[in-house]
Amino acid sequence: MKIYSIQFEGYWLERNKGDVPAQSGVYLVYRGQYNIEKNIVELNEIIYIGQSVNMRERIVNHDHLQAFNATLNAGETLCYSCAAVDEEDLDIVENALIIAQKPRLNETIRNDVDYSEKRFRVNGRCSLLKYTDFTITSNAN
């Protein structure tokens, strides 16, 4: 069984999303509230999970930005967290996270991904993920 170790880095507020790494990986999009006095972000919900060969370019120019913003409540902002993933593993890692998390704006998963048994260990800046150590099999899709 292949084991994927995924290390999330970040968090970046919407206004700082240009600082996201320009590398291949997966990213989480959150609804959150920034507390300027404490300089902390309270994350409320993961709304989307995506992947790209260049996460910075994808997040800065995201075609779902309007949909992301439509989920925000008063006083909230978008926040991002990213994990470097080799380009050849992007589809399986993204799909596994979507299957485990089921964010509201991820409507579909890829059907052409190899779903043989794989284990995922997720660490780092990934608050609100329901599962951080899980296995998927052909029965998961």
Image: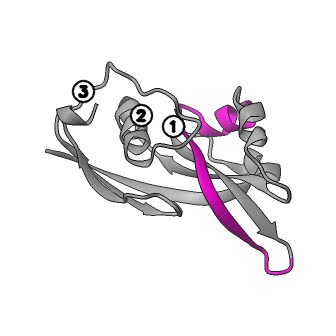
Q: Measured from the top left, where is residue 40 in percent x and y? A: 73, 73
Colouring: one colour
What residue sits right under mark 3 in the picture? 114
Mark 2: few, some, or many residues within 10 Å (few <14, many ≥20)?
some
Task: Tell which tag, 1 or 2, sits nearer the viewer.
Answer: 2
Q: Residue at x 74, y 47 (%)?
A: 17
Task: Depth check: give the residue in front, 115 or 23.
Answer: 115
Residue range highlighted in magenta: 37-61
Q: Which mark is residue 106?
A: none
Q: Pointers 3 and 2 in contact (CB under 8 A)?
A: no
Q: Residue at x 79, y 75 (%)?
A: 39
In terms of sequence position, does the residue under pointer 1 or pointer 2 come before the other?
1
Q: Residue at x 52, y 61 (%)?
A: 128
Q: Is residue 4 above or below residue 109?
A: below
Q: Is residue 112 left or right of residue 72?
A: left
Q: Is residue 102 left or right of residue 3?
A: right
Marks 3/2: CA distance? 12 Å
What residue sits right under mark 1 in the picture? 24
What residue sits right under mark 2 in the picture? 90
Secondary structure category for the residue under label 1: loop
Secondary structure category for the residue under label 3: loop
Q: Measured from the top left, where is residue 83 in percent x and y? A: 50, 50
Q: Pointers 1 and 2 in contact (CB under 8 A)?
A: yes
Quadrant in the picture for the C terminus: top left
Q: Quadrant of residue 61?
A: top right
Q: Is residue 92 left or right of residue 29?
A: left
Amino acid tagged 1: Ser
